[in-house]
Amino acid sequence: VLILLAIACGASWPTAASGKGARGAASAASSDRTERPRPSRAHSRPTSMRAAPLRASTALLLVVMLVPQARSQSALEPAHAPKHTPAAHQDRKAAMLLENWQQHMRSGHGTKVATQYHFAYARHLAPFNQGNITMLEVGANQGDSLFAWAAWFENAFSIFGLRYGVKDSHMGKCHHKYCHKVRIIDGDQSNSDDLRRLTAAAFGPHWTPPPALDAAAWADGGFDVIIDDGSHVPRHILFTFKHLFPHVRPGGIYIIEDNGFSYTDQPTKVYGYAVGDGGIGRPPPGNAIEKFKQLVDIVNREECMPTLDIVVFSEEIDRSVMEVSFVSGLVIVKKKTQTEFDGLRRLRPSSSVAMTSGGSLERYKARLAREQAV
């Protein structure tokens, strides 16, 4: 386009003669003046000036014709992958979270640094990054992860930690400006009295989770995020979830780390507790994963089987579960908002009599009853 414009506008290109220098050019010009007669005044207007309007019109026509074609051609050419894709953004956030953990957790402490949990956490915790949230981590240990979360959730209101068997003298030190948000409470996650003391310390002794998801009382209490990084004993995991998930605010999330001991089918110990009655496919409570798998049927109930009348944890917990996710070593359970609850209740079910008339539902309910009796 530029070359054609230059030609149309009458640009002169350098020639061999033009390289003679100023003196040669001057002598040539004087020679021309002596050999050619001087033109009359009527014809003294240079040719280039007479052709200027024509060349300008030609240049404008070329621009109009060629620029759209160049743009359409570039649109057809394969483009490079964009640098700011959602996946790239997610990877950057995960890398930032991992860096946060490495900075605030001492070497050898916590499985978060040693695992790939930062990918799942960066995605599932993204909605809470800028919120004035209240968070709880079961298994405060020496406080490293609490300090890391306080730095990550800069706008958090409070970061609570449930500590068991760790003395104050063994606690780590917090060295950033968000340390004042961290509160550590001693207690055993397998003890219901300790869990009640925990929630009373967080929200006051008289606050209880309201049954309605849109209740005004949620403004006064409840956790937006709960992470169970405690004993890792499957029975303790289920016990703690049943007691604390009702305290998750609508739209909040409950995450359980290090679920590998659900697959342990030989006697062993974790933090001094005996485990080993699990194994792949084995029923709960020895295998907590199998219990959370049952929530998949609850999540699908509104659309696929609205007559499904099973209870996995409790009626209150089951009807409030929006989704359950399994990510390597993690179980993630999200609580419904009132809007989600109302929307799913208006679903037109796709079930039919053929889905339940074969006897599978009754057999499944009998199996659940046997497991819950343990």
Image (cartoon, rainbow, N blue to C red):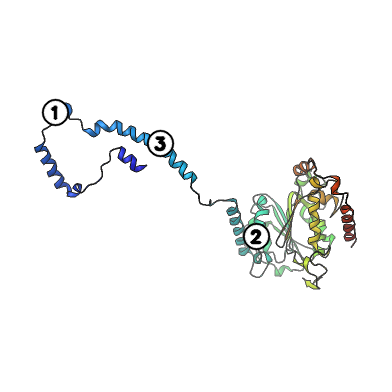
- Image coordinates of residue 63 in percent, x first then y, are 38, 37
User: What residue sits right under mark 3 in the picture?
Assistant: 65
Secondary structure type for disc 3: helix
Q: Nearer the viewer, residue 158 or 239?
A: 239
Residue type, numbered disc 2: His
What amino acid does circle 3 point to?
A: Met
Q: Can you tell which of label 3 and label 1 is closer to the viewer?
A: 3
- Residue 206 seen in the current view: no
- In the rendered image, the vertical position of residue 250 relative to residue 255, given as above or below: above
Q: Nearer the viewer, residue 374 or 196?
A: 374
Indicate the secondary structure of the residue bearing disc 1: loop
The residue where tag 1 is placed is 40
Can you give x and y, in whole percent of width and height, for residue 263 in the image? 77, 67
How far is disc 3 from disc 2 in space, using C-alphas?
Answer: 53 Å
Read off the residue under disc 2.
Answer: 118
Is disc 3 surrounded by few (<14), some (14 to 19) or many (20+) residues within 10 Å? Answer: few
At a point 79% along the width and 73% down the height, the residue shown is 268
* Label 3, label 1: how far apart the Cα atoms are: 41 Å
The first of marks 3 and 2 along the sequence is 3
First of labels 2, 1 by sequence position: 1
C-alpha span from label 2 to label 1: 87 Å
Image x and y of residue 226, in percent: 74, 56
